Image (cartoon, rainbow, N blue to C red):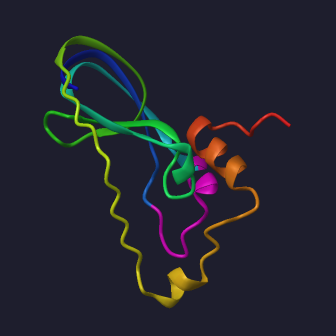
Amino acid sequence: ITGRFSDVVTRTVVKQSKPYPPMAHAVGGDKELRFTDVEGVIGGFRTPVFEKGISVPGCHVHFIDSDRTSGGHVLDYTIDEATIELCPGTDLELRLPLTNEFGAANLAPEDLDSQLHTTEIKTPPAQ
């Protein structure tokens, strides 16, 4: 979506350092930004449920302003005028690092659903 927006609300995680914390912890220090009367691009994709763990299932969109200096994960937006372009994608290419650190990483934690929920929604899931 390329155009002019009366309002865009985004969330941005602050830069992290090694050893990297789990994403659910990293988002604790994130910040919300509100852009008003701004031009830019909202781009995103929809991930199927069976790719959970590789990505977050569902729709995932990000915004960047026309100066390419500010943006983030989109929480809400209102379009004034825009062009919407769709590109159906059917391919997934995944390149994994060949490092000891990656080989030792726990990529399937028991609480994966809870971590994804906390990361995207910012509240623990209902029990």
Q: How many marks?
A: 0
Q: Is residue 51 above or below residue 63?
A: below
Q: Could you tell me residue 24's position as x and y percent?
A: 63, 52
- Which quarter of the rendering shows the N terminus? top left
The answer to which quarter of the image holds residue 47 is top left
Q: Where residue 51 sits in the image (x, y, percent)?
A: 52, 52
Name which quarter of the figure residue 59 lies in.
top left
Q: Which residues are magenta?
A: 16-28
Q: Nearer the viewer, residue 7 or 96?
A: 96
- Given residues 54 and 42, the one toward you in this image is 54
**What residue is at 47 percent from the left and 63 percent from the top?**
16
Residue shown at 65% from the left, 42% from the top: 117
**Residue for point 42% across, 59% down:** 15
Residue furthest bottom in the image: 100
Which residue is nearer to you in this view: 25 or 42?
42
Location of the C terminus by quadrant is top right
Quadrant assignment, res 79? top left
Say left or right for 26 vs 41. Answer: right
Q: Is residue 109 left or right of residue 59?
A: right
Q: Please tell me whether residue 23 belongs to the stretch shown in magenta.
A: yes
80 in the magenta segment: no
Instruction: Tell me: residue 114, above or below residue 76.
Output: below
